[in-house]
Image: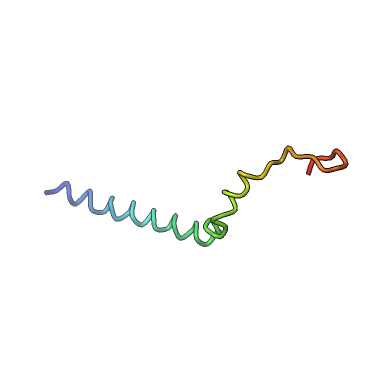
Amino acid sequence: MTVLLFLIPVALFLGGLGLVGFLWSLKSGQYDDLEGASWRILDDDDLEDDDGKKA
């Protein structure tokens, strides 16, 4: 039973740490562009223009 006196504060601390990390990621814009990465992986950077230069 005394283990709960240790585990409950640790669990609350870790939960709060996860909440702070999630709120930080929202504030820093991590979820603003959800489709950008899926389109960037399909973009072919090796294609060349008509001038022979990379696009």
Nearer to us in this view, 6 or 53:
53
Which image quarter: residue 32? bottom right
Residue, far right: 51
Nearer to us in this view, 11 or 51:
51
Residue appearing at x 52%, y 58% in the figure:
31
Nearer to us in this view, 18 or 40:
40
Q: Where's residue 22, x and y in %?
A: 44, 57
Work out which quarter of the rendered image holds the C terminus and state it: top right
Q: How many labels, in total?
A: 0
Q: Where's residue 29, x and y in %?
A: 55, 59
Left or right: residue 36 compared with residue 17: right
Q: Where's residue 7, x and y in %?
A: 23, 49
Residue appearing at x 11%, y 49% in the figure:
1
Q: Identify the coloring.
A: rainbow
Left or right: residue 46 compared with residue 11: right
Q: Where's residue 36, x and y in %?
A: 60, 53
Residue appearing at x 52%, y 62% in the figure:
27
Residue, far front: 50
Residue appearing at x 22%, y 49% in the figure:
6
